[in-house]
Image (cartoon, rainbow, N blue to C red):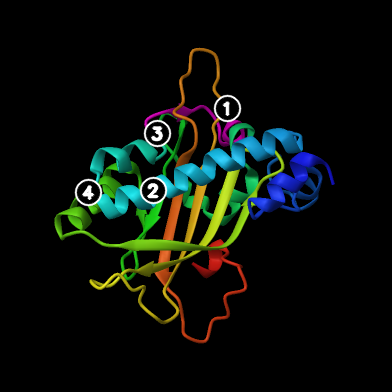
Amino acid sequence: PSLWETLLERLGVTVEGCGSTAEAREGALPSAPAVGPRLLFSRARAAIAKNEGFYRSFRERDHLAMASLWLSDARPWPEREQISQFFPAGLLRDYPDLCVRQQDGQVLLRPFCRHPGSPPLLGWQAINDSWVQIFSAGALEIWPEARRITISPCGRLVRFALTERILSSRGIRTPGPGIASRNDFVLPQAGEGDEWPGWSIVVHDAHPTPAQEAPNGELLGDAS
């Protein structure tokens, strides 16, 4: 392996084994072209920092910081096929409701959020309201334990399969299976005249982990 492949491995990040050829064979929309290990390492490290920022803003009840991390759903797209040029096809396959077609034929890509024991939320407005309620209820000391981190070959999707644990008032992490969470961060490809904030959360999917579930690092969309 090259130096950058080794550094990527030391980060605990693996590259998904689903390049554009495999996706085309499955009939999915094609993803962006693959990039080299140096760029994958740089992008993975930046996404890991964003994921850490997500939980830091959670613990500190920093609403502005939390809001800055999420993908905006304000930009319309002419066709769903154009979205596939910016975002890996596997993401849309796992969460097809991310895309909604408007009456004028344009498509909106909406972020997805599911808190434990709550129904799924689509779109930033509903997600924002949920964080306002959560933060108003008091601080939560939630610390993530990474089970698996993957990056797409195009380097535009980093997926975290995590176990979230709540810190007790004595500073001890609560025992038990914890909360399984899937966090997907996307890096949009800016078009002419566009400005993007870098890595943004498009999926936060959290649910209680069954006691019998083995922490094998797998957290798929249909199981969340």
Is there a contact, CB below 8 Å, between mark 2 and mark 4? Answer: no
Q: Secondary structure at mark 2?
A: helix
- For marks 4 and 1 on the same chain, the one whose residue lies earlier in the sequence: 4
**Residue at 42 percent of width and 82 percent of height:** 176
Mark 1 vs mark 3: give the one in front. Answer: 1
Total numbered labels placed on residues in the image: 4
Can you see residue 14?
no
**In the image, is 211 to the left or to the right of 45?**
left
Q: Amino acid at mark 2?
A: Phe
The disc, 2 or 1, on the residue closer to the chain's N-terminal end is 2
Residue labelled with disc 3: 103
Alpha carbon distance from label 1 to label 3:
26 Å
Give the SS element for disc 4.
Answer: helix
- Residue 156 horizontal side relative to residue 209, left or right: right
Tell me which label, 3 or 4, sits earlier in the chain.
3
**Disc number placed over residue 189 in the picture, else none:** 1
Q: Between label 2 and label 1, give the one nearer the viewer.
A: 2
Residue range highlighted in magenta: 74-84
Give the labeled residue for mark 2.
54
Please state if 21 lies on the left or on the right of 214 as rendered.
right
Q: CA distance from mark 4 to mark 1?
A: 28 Å
Q: Residue 222, image x and y in percent? A: 55, 66
Within 10 Å of disc 2 (Cα), the crowding (few <14, some 14-19, many 20+) is many
Q: Measure the alpha-carbon separation of dots 2 and 4.
A: 16 Å
Mark 1, secondary structure of its residue = loop
Real-space Cα distance between discs 2 and 1?
Answer: 22 Å
Q: Amino acid at mark 3?
A: Gln
Give the residue type at disc 1. Answer: Gln
